[in-house]
Image (cartoon, rainbow, N blue to C red):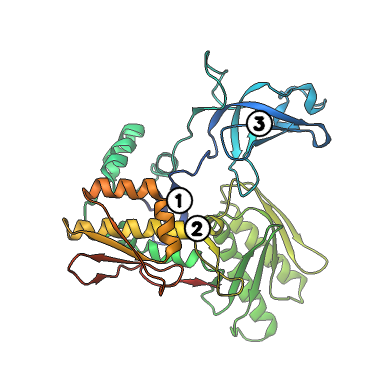
């Protein structure tokens, strides 16, 4: 059960965390300015290509890559036969809804059956956004805020006002702490988010799991890690049961989707395998996305699929490490937004200072590129410009915030985090 919803807004980014009674992260949603279309958005698009060979059409929805409209989502609900060309032609104007966000070179997945929209308004030319889906904060509060004893903490007055207006029945639960510290840091969330960016997850009993995402699938390996529970069979079962629960939780937290293969610690007993599979199925019962669990294969691996609605957390927040042989580190944009967030936290504690961000060139490039609107927002709120100082001696995912004529301020996220 969700005990608290935290909403933290900073220049260019809004983060929403759902916590249980123990303060453990149950759900994390990161929204950024410039993310593009999100699931649920309704768009007036134009068909730019009909691909008869694959029974699909490409639709211009205003993004870099056209959206994908498959046959099943193009035909009316009462039609069960026909080809894509029977329902759409090149140049058609269509009202479509986003089922899955764009990812990499793949455009958004679309449906021609948007909820609650009868048609396009007169005089509107595609592509144009007709209706924006609720943001992460509004969606989380509307869905989970009504649970008994659920706290709703918001560190931004504007968002708090929007939430009170959007969900008036919960207005009295929405609190704005107004402190000078970071809400996520104070509630222990930042540390948990850092852990999500590592492929390694340590289990309470000594075992561990490794999660590796590839283009084709997500491979998860379970290792005893030196754990001992009274013999080989008991150890394997104990570690695998812990792993099953942890994997179900990690899939949700990391927003992992697609084909997933799990290599549990080998078990000789068929009964033990059934027990582990039941534990995994139980953990997946509360998953917000559709999951199909195929079970153990003849090679002893467990296969499942989880609906994909967009890029995973790892893909969004990290990039390949340029110097650690296949590892990943925080992406320059992620570090840039963290630096802006750190500046705003420090300025609440020491208002009026002239702040500088020291970081590698790639991070400063992000602050002048994709994160430029966020930097301009921060400067407007500060009432003065930020200084950007190149530090080539810093690792790719490191930054420092300094104040004029003051010592370096090193917030909690001023450190190097290599994600192996």
Residue 156: x percent and y percent?
28, 46
Closer to the chain start, of discs 2 and 3, is: 3
Q: Which residue is mark 3?
A: 59
Closer to the chain start, of discs 3 and 1, is: 1
For this view, does 25 lie left or right of residue 295?
left
Asked if marks 2 and 1 touch (Cβ < 8 Å), the reply is: yes
Mark 2 residue element? helix
Look at discs 2 and 1 and give the one toward the viewer.
2
In the rendered view, would you say 96 is above or below 395? above
Look at discs 3 and 1 and give the one toward the viewer.
3
Closer to the chain start, of discs 2 and 1, is: 1
**Residue placed most toward the observer, 362 or 131:** 362
| Residue 59 in view here | yes
Q: CA distance from mark 2 to mark 1?
A: 9 Å
Within 10 Å of disc 1 (Cα), the crowding (few <14, some 14-19, many 20+) is some
Question: Residue 184 lies in what quarter of the image?
Answer: bottom left
Question: Residue 334 lies in what quarter of the image?
Answer: bottom left
Q: Which residue is mark 1?
A: 30
**Residue placed most toward the observer, 24 or 82:** 82
Residue at (72%, 65%) from the top-left corner? Answer: 274
Q: CA distance from mark 2 to mark 3?
A: 28 Å
Point out the residue furthest to the top here.
Answer: 122
Residue at (82%, 27%) from the top-left corner? Answer: 83
**In the image, which disc is placed on residue 317?**
2
């Amino acid at each position: 059960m969700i005990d608290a919803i935290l909403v933290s807004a900073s220049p260019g980014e809004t983060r929403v965390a759902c916590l249980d009674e123990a303060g453990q992260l149950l759900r994390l949603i990161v929204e950024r300015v410039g993310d593009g279309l999100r699931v649920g958005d309704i768009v007036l698009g134009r068909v730019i290509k009909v691909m008869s060979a694959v029974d699909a059409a490409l639709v211009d929805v205003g993004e870099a890559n056209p959206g994908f409209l498959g046959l099943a989502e193009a035909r009316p609900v009462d039609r069960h036969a026909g080809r894509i060309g029977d329902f759409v032609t090149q140049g058609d104007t269509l009202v479509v809804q986003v089922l899955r966000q764009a990812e990499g070179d793949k455009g958004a997945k679309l449906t021609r059956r948007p909820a609650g929209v009868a048609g396009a308004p007169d005089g509107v030319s595609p592509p144009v956004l007709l209706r924006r889906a609720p943001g992460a904060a509004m969606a989380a509060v509307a869905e989970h805020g009504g649970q008994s004893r659920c706290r709703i903490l918001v560190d931004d007055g504007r968002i708090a006002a929007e939430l009170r207006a959007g969900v008036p029945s919960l207005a009295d639960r929405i609190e704005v702490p107004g402190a000078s510290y970071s809400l996520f840091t104070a509630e222990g969330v930042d540390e948990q988010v850092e852990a999500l960016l590592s492929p390694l997850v340590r289990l309470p009993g000594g075992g561990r799991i490794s999660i590796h995402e590839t283009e084709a699938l997500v491979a998860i390996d379970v290792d005893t890690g030196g754990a001992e529970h009274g013999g080989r069979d008991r150890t394997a079962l104990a570690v695998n049961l812990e792993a099953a629960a942890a994997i179900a939780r990690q899939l949700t937290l990391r927003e992992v989707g697609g084909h997933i293969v799990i290599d549990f610690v080998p078990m000789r007993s068929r009964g033990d395998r059934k027990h582990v599979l039941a534990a995994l199925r139980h953990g997946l019962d509360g998953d917000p996305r559709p999951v199909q669990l195929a079970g153990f294969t003849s090679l002893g691996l467990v296969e499942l699929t989880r609906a994909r609605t967009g890029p995973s957390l790892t893909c969004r927040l990290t990039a390949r490490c340029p110097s650690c042989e296949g590892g990943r580190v925080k992406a320059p944009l992620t570090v840039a937004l963290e630096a802006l967030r750190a500046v705003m936290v420090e300025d609440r504690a020491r208002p009026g200072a002239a702040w500088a961000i020291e970081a590698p060139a790639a991070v400063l490039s992000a602050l002048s590129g994709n994160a430029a609107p966020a930097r301009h927002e921060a400067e407007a709120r500060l009432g003065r410009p930020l200084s950007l100082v190149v530090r080539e001696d810093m690792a790719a995912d490191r930054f420092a915030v300094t104040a004029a004529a003051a010592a370096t301020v090193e917030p909690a996220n001023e450190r190097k985090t290599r994600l192996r």
